Image: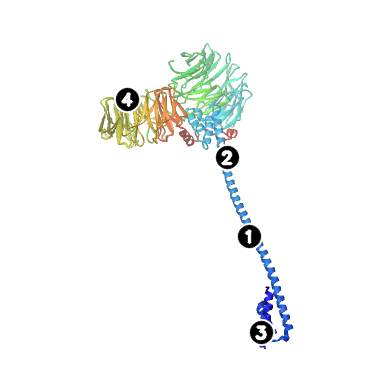
Amino acid sequence: MTRFSVLLAFAFLVVLSAAGQGCPYYKHLMDQGTQFQKDKLYEKALKKYNAAKLCAPEQTKLIDQKITQLFSDIEQEKIEAEKQRKAAQLAQKETKKQQLLAEKAKKEAISQRDSARLAQLKAERQQGIAEKATIEAQRQRDTAQSLFWVSESDKFILGGVLRSLEKGSKYVLSIPIYERIARIFNKGDKNLFIYSILTHQSAVNSAVFSPDGNHIMTASYDKTAKVWDLRGNKLITLTHQDPVHSAKFSPDGNRIITASYDKTAKVWDLKGNLVATLPHQGPVRSAAFSPDGNRIVTTSDDETVKVWDLAGNLRTTLTHQGYVYSAEFSPDGNHIVVATLKTAKVWDLKENKLITLTHRGSVSSAVFSPDGTYIVVATGKTAKVWDLRGNKLITLTHQDPVYSAKFSPDGNRIITASYDKTAKVWDLKGNLITTLPHQGPVRSAAFSPDGNRIVTTSDDETAQVWDLAGNLRTTLTHQGSVSSAVFSPDGNHIVTASYDKTARVWNLKENLIPTLTHQGYVYSAEFSPDGNRIVTASYDKTAKVWDLKGNLLTTLPHQFPVFSAEFSPDGNHIVTASTDTKIWDLKGNLLITLAHQSSGRHSTFSPDSNRIVTASSDNTAKIWNLKGILMATLPHQGPVRSAAFSLDSNRVVTTSDDNTVKVWDLKGNLLTTLLHLGYVTSAAFSPDGNRIVVATDKTAKAWDLKGNLVITMTHLDYVRSAQFSPDGNYIAVATDKTAKVWDLKGNLVATLPHQGPVRSAAFSPDGNRIVTTSDDKTAKIWDLKGNLLITLAHLAYVSSAVFSPDGNRIVTTSYDNTAKIWYTAEGALKWLKENNDKVPQLTEENKKKYGVED
């Protein structure tokens, strides 16, 4: 039944009810029906209309119109409701659609956000990779550059090599770079200290310093002479038409004289202005100023010697028979000595007399003694000394022609240079003092201004610096024959001239590898705790204290050979072991002598510096305080080889020929005995004091303090020493022709080979390096993997080597009667950075050529 049918039935019942009762409220019912209809209360409105029909049937037609309108409104409401329902459905669908779109957009936004984050992370990662790649490329470039410079080091200044290595070390601290710095330093090569290279286009004939030592004059086959400062900056160029044979400064340094194959000598001022031309008819061999600087003497192949004033006016001509090689004034300016084909002639300028000094061979040089009373002439295979009257005093003989001969500054010695590959030093009686050998003919030889050193030059492409005893101090290298070398007026520099088209200025003040000399074997050397001093012990019956530059500070004399010497840990005392033990202060004052019944072998301080333990062949070790009072005697059944304190200073370990190792307290109570089957050479505590390593027969053994054997390290030959690393994790053993490194489990970590028996092996303070010494005349530095880093050479067995406390240096001792101080890689680089002004900088040309950046 529809809603409309229900309403009709209901209306019919209302009409029947009204007909039975009568209804006077027609108008009121109609008003109420109309109001309900407006309010859309359709059911109530219909009731009112039907009631009105019963009350006033005569109004039925009107009321039916109202009812019809009512149903029309109901139908319209129904249609509107349907429309709204459909609209609501559409809205719901749209909302759902929008929700879906929103969710999709949200997911898209989240996805894009995640993608953006991933992209950012990727970009950051790529940036990091790019930065690492840039750094790696830079590192590789610097490494390649550094290695290139090392490989080319024979062609360039070593200072330049070091500069490149230093820059490379900022990026790479690997062995190929870092250790190569140390190798260069440990050659002790003066090539490191070339102040400058003075370049010509052809061979350099001569190079000299100005009187004040601030400038250098070079003469070359390239037809020029050039003036330079000490750093190699070219100041002026003086030009001839042919090669320049020589160039010299005037005594006051204000004029220059050049001699050339273009048949002229020329006088110049320091600005390069030509002052005068001095002509000859042939090539000019030499030109020199008088001592007062007012005259010039020239020699020529035109067989003449000429004397000129500074304005170029010819004052005197002296004619010879043959080429005239050289001429020079006497110190007082009153004589000239001339070297010609087979004679030397002395020209007295005051009396105009000529003295002839006749020789059988060609005369290559003739010079006055410093006081002007003698002349030494190099001729044939001899040098001859004459007085001014023409009397021959002595003859100095070589095996081949003599190129030059010169007096020492005090006039008491003569140096000769010969084609026989030697220079020789003589006294004025003709006695040979020393011979200075080269590998090729010796072109020149000259004394230093103080007369204590000699520089020689040779066709073997070297100049060499010697002391008066004939000891070679320095070798200076070129790439061609070295024609001349002279000291600067202060003796701190040398300038060499070479056929390699360069002159080179060298700094002699630096001595990288000091040599500490004794008169007998050097057994040991130790650094002071602050690393600033070294004490050496020698067979020559002395111990000596030195600074790091090799200066002797004090000598500690003994009656017999000194086997060991060391500083106290607080640095205030020195203990030496000879037949007795002595304690000294740092000034060399003897404080106490500690005696055994037989000769002593070893002595050492306790780590707290309060006690000393001595080991003796009288079958005892003894503990003493610093006042020399005996605190305890530690007996053995045989000579005691060594004694050492634990790091806490509370225990002592001793070794003896009775095949035992014993551990004691400070009162002399025996704590442990370690019995061995063979010869015991040394024993040492581990850093933590919990183990002892013993060197014996063909083994090294590690024990705990209860006497339990922890490790046995087997070798093929006699074991000389065994030592723990600073961290206690490794043991270095010196034996046969190797040193070996073991871990605490007894695993062999590395083998360090030599060509002869190894005497010692010691760790660096950081434990990362090991230095070994051998009868093969070398000490060698290794890393813990067994890679050889540096070899340090002596002339005989190397008996010991130790690192300095900071690890920057090593001191080695040898049976060649010396100890030497060397640089480690770290020490060399540190020195280079701290002494930036002493090593030449890279030239701008080389920086550009090899891509070196500051």
Return the x and y of residue 837 as percentages of the image width and height: 50, 35
CB atoms of marks 2 and 4 within 8 Å: no
Q: Is residue 525 visible?
A: no
Please give the label number shown on residue 99.
1
| Whole-number angstrom distance, CA of label 1 to CA of label 4 | 95 Å
Badge 2 or badge 4: first in the primary sequence: 2
Quarter of the view holding residue 619: top left
Q: What's the distance in space between the residues labelled 3 and 1, CA to CA?
A: 58 Å
Residue wearing tag 2: 133
Q: Quadrant where the C terminus lies?
A: top right
**Element carrying mark 3:** helix
Indicate the position of residue 700 as horizontal and vertical percent values.
37, 28
Q: How dense is the environment of label 4, judged by Cα within 10 Å: few (below 14), some, or many (20 and up)?
A: few
Q: Is 36 situated above or below 230?
A: below
Question: From the viewer's perspective, is 606 left or right of 308?
Answer: left
Front disc: 3 or 1 = 3
Under mark 4, the amino acid is Leu
**Cβ atoms under marks 1 and 4 closer than 8 Å:** no
Label 4: element kind:
loop
Query: Which residue is at the far top?
Result: 360
Please identify, in this view, whether the residue under mark 2 or under mark 4 is nearer the observer: 4
To which quarter of the image does residue 6 belong?
bottom right
The nearer-to-camera label among 3 and 4 is: 3
- Name the N-terminal-most of marks 3 and 1: 3
Pointers 2 and 3 in contact (CB under 8 A)? no
Which residue type does callout 2 highlight? Ala
**Alpha-carbon span between mark 2 and mark 4:** 61 Å
- Label drawn at residue 17: 3
Towards the viewer: 669 or 566:
669
Element under label 2? Answer: helix
Quadrant of the rendering where the N terminus is positioned: bottom right
